[in-house]
Amino acid sequence: MGFLRKKTLRREFDEKLTEQLFKQKEEWNRQKKLVEKSLEPSAEVLYELKVAEAKYFFYLREAKQRNLKISRWK
């Protein structure tokens, strides 16, 4: 019984992780485009870009560590 519960929890967490990974990738790309279009990006915008990048790579590392099979790479 405990094994089935663990498998269900893992699947739910993996789905949430996948959603967060794609959301963060979109946010990172949005921040990159903003910096590219700016003539002189402010320090705050550059900071937001670094934060978005760090979050995305954190989620990506976590997905790789959990051996997630992501079928909908964008």
Image: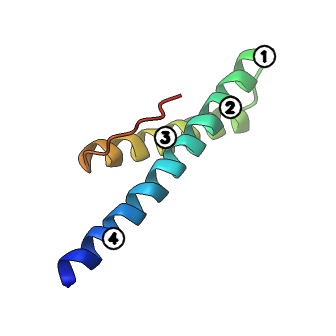
Q: Residues within 10 Å of mark 2 (few under 14, many from 20)?
A: many
Task: Specify which label sits upstream in the sequence, 4 or 2.
Answer: 4
Q: Alpha-carbon distance for marks 2 and 3?
A: 12 Å
Task: Specify which label sits upstream in the sequence, 1 or 2.
Answer: 2
Residue wearing tag 1? 37
Task: Specify which label sits upstream in the sequence, 2 or 3.
Answer: 2
Q: For numbered disc 1, what is the local secondary structure? A: helix
Q: Alpha-carbon distance for marks 4 and 2?
A: 35 Å
Badge 2 amino acid: Gln
Observer-side mark, 1 or 4, equals 4
Whole-percent x and y of residue 56?
49, 40
Judge by depth and name the residue closer to the eye, 25 or 15: 15
Q: In percent of the image, x 71 and y 34: which residue is there?
A: 45
Q: Alpha-carbon distance for marks 4 and 3?
A: 25 Å
Residue wearing tag 3? 56
Left or right of 13? Residue 20 is right
Whole-percent x and y of residue 11?
36, 62
Residues tagged 4 and 3 counted as in contact (Cβ below 8 A): no
Whole-percent x and y of residue 72?
48, 34
Residues tagged 3 and 1 counted as in contact (Cβ below 8 A): no
Observer-side mark, 4 or 2, equals 4
Whole-percent x and y of residue 66?
26, 51
Q: In percent of the image, x 31 and y 45: which residue is there?
A: 68
Residue wearing tag 4? 8
Badge 3 amino acid: Tyr
Badge 4 amino acid: Thr
Judge by depth and name the residue closer to the eye, 36 or 20: 20
